[in-house]
Image (cartoon, rainbow, N blue to C red):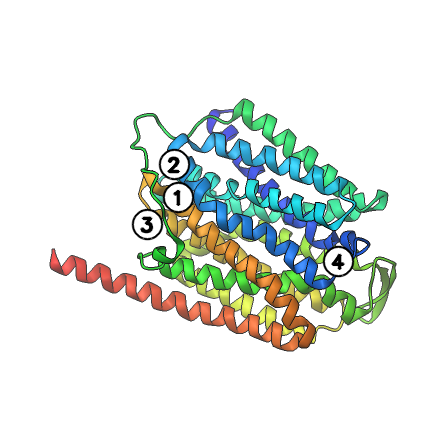
């Protein structure tokens, strides 16, 4: 295997592990913690806690990767992620899950900015969208495998999936330590260890993209954080098998089964979109229109969730959402990367990761609270946020083109 192939494989697996944790936790967290006394609000806080640590530490890890290199940050993230899964698996009280989620967020926050900066280090602008799409496909694969691991391993106990994920993370750490070289060349300028406050970053040319990704992440987190409870309340499901309508018939399913099936299908669609379709779509209509089309599909899917009446309609709505996210994420990552110089790739991607995380912090908490009052308000409101984000990206792109014309005119 050639060096570049080994690099891409390790990066692919690292992003897979990054989302595998999410894929494992979401379907079983409500059931795993219920016997510990957790409520729907507690589950929302636990999901938000992971993202809160990403929000705080992603810019820091990004700046560290600019200073010392991408490789050590990626490896530290993988190792710490494996340790956090192990702690979760051994947890018998709710505070232990809080500790493991905190550690997972701190460690995982270094993976996204370092991996995306690594891609920027080894590619030119033309080849970047394809590899960013592959990373997105890896993320989708984590969402596919995560629920599958949860569903299968939960047969032997709800903590078994976490031990399986820990083993995968540690194996990837060993593989990366053996085969992943450093991407930053010794002759490159080293970024100064200056702070990049999130608020001031909104005033930069990239601020519009950061702002949009916050709102999209917020809307997605509102849906993801309440989906298990929506399935339980809408169809009367729990961890015990009961009948669920499917295209006029009915099948015996548990709540974790349905949630796992939903996230698995969403992940599969994401893999296809980001691994295969995204390059062709961007080539035909460009990154701006691809993002706007993706946001439109997200909005429609969220709005239609309110009216689902069986498993098929539930899956259809979530498929639309997944296709939309499969279009949005790689395009945004590529746009940010193209507009960032080589020495600040890590820190800028860290800021982008923080805005994503901020949305995932507030989303489950706000979503959990709104859900208790009105499901319709929550899902229609999330759809409205996605639709307004499409308008926002159009305004941002028009402003960028206007600024470019003014600069050219002055020259």
Q: Select label 3 or label 1 by which is in front.
A: 1
Q: Is residue 236 left or right of residue 187?
A: right
Figure check: 363 above or below 174: below
Q: Reading the chain from its start, which is encountered first: label 1 or label 4?
A: 4
User: Disc 1 designates what residue?
Assistant: 347
Q: Residue 339 carries which label?
A: 3
Q: Nearer the viewer, residue 145 or 215?
A: 215
Q: Name the residue: 69% across, 46% down.
A: 146
Q: Reading the chain from its start, which is encountered first: label 2 or label 1?
A: 2
Q: Which of 90 and 399 is in front in this view?
A: 90
Q: Cβ–Cβ below 8 Å for labels 4 and 3?
A: no
Q: Position of residue 85 (x, y in %)?
A: 68, 40
Q: Reading the chain from its start, which is encountered first: label 3 or label 1?
A: 3
Label 2, label 4: how far apart the Cα atoms are: 40 Å
Q: Select label 2 or label 3 by which is in front.
A: 2
Q: Reading the chain from its start, which is encountered first: label 2 or label 3?
A: 2
Q: Name the residue: 45% across, 67% down.
A: 389
Q: Residue furthest left?
A: 411
Q: Where is residue 184 in the image (x, y as percent from the top left)?
A: 38, 30
Q: Cβ–Cβ below 8 Å for labels 2 and 1?
A: yes
For residue 276, say whether it is visible. Answer: no
Q: Select label 4 or label 3 by which is in front.
A: 4
Q: Which of 36 and 129 is in front in this view?
A: 36
Q: Name the residue: 56% across, 62% down.
A: 362
Q: Reading the chain from its start, which is encountered first: label 2 or label 4?
A: 4
Kindly state the secondary structure of the residue where label 3 is placed.
loop
User: Disc 4 designates what residue?
Assistant: 38
Kindly state the secondary structure of the residue where label 4 is placed.
loop
């Amino acid at each position: 295997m050639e060096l570049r192939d080994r690099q891409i494989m390790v990066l692919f697996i690292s992003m897979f592990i990054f989302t595998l944790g999410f894929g494992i936790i979401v379907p079983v967290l409500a059931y795993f913690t219920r016997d510990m006394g957790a409520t729907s609000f507690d589950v929302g806080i636990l999901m938000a806690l992971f993202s809160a640590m990403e929000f705080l530490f992603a810019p820091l890890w990004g700046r560290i990767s600019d200073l010392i290199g991408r490789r050590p940050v990626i490896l530290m993230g993988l190792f710490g992620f494996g340790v956090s899964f192990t702690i979760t698996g051994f947890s018998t009280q709710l505070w232990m899950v809080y500790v493991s989620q905190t550690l997972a967020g701190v460690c995982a926050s270094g993976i996204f900015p370092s991996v995306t900066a690594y891609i920027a280090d080894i590619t030119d602008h033309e080849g970047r969208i394809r590899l960013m799409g592959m990373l997105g496909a890896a993320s989708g694969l984590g969402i596919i495998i995560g629920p599958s691991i949860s569903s299968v391993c939960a047969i032997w106990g709800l903590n078994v999936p976490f031990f399986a994920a820990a083993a995968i993370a540690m194996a990837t750490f060993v593989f990366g330590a053996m085969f992943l070289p450093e991407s930053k060349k010794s002759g490159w300028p080293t970024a100064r260890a200056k702070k990049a406050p999130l608020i001031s970053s909104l005033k930069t040319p990239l601020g519009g993209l950061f702002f949009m990704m916050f709102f999209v992440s917020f809307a997605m987190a509102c849906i993801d954080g309440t989906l298990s409870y929506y399935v339980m309340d809408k169809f009367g499901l729990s961890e015990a098998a009961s009948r669920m309508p499917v295209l006029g018939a009915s099948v015996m399913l548990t709540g974790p089964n349905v949630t796992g099936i939903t996230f698995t299908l969403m992940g599969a669609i994401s893999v296809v979109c980001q691994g295969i379709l995204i390059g062709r779509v961007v080539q035909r209509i460009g990154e701006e229109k691809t993002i706007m089309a993706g946001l439109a599909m997200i909005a429609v899917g969220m709005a239609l969730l309110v009216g689902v009446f069986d498993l098929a309609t539930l899956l259809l709505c979530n498929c639309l959402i997944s296709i939309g996210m499969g279009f949005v994420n790689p395009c945004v990552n590529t746009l940010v990367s193209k507009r960032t110089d080589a020495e600040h790739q890590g820190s800028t991607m860290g800021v982008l990761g923080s805005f994503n995380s901020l949305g995932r912090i507030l989303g489950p908490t706000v979503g959990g609270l709104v859900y208790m009052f009105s499901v319709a308000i929550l899902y229609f409101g999330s759809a409205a946020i996605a639709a307004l984000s499409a308008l926002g990206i159009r305004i941002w792109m028009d402003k960028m083109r206007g600024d470019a014309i003014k600069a050219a005119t002055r020259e």
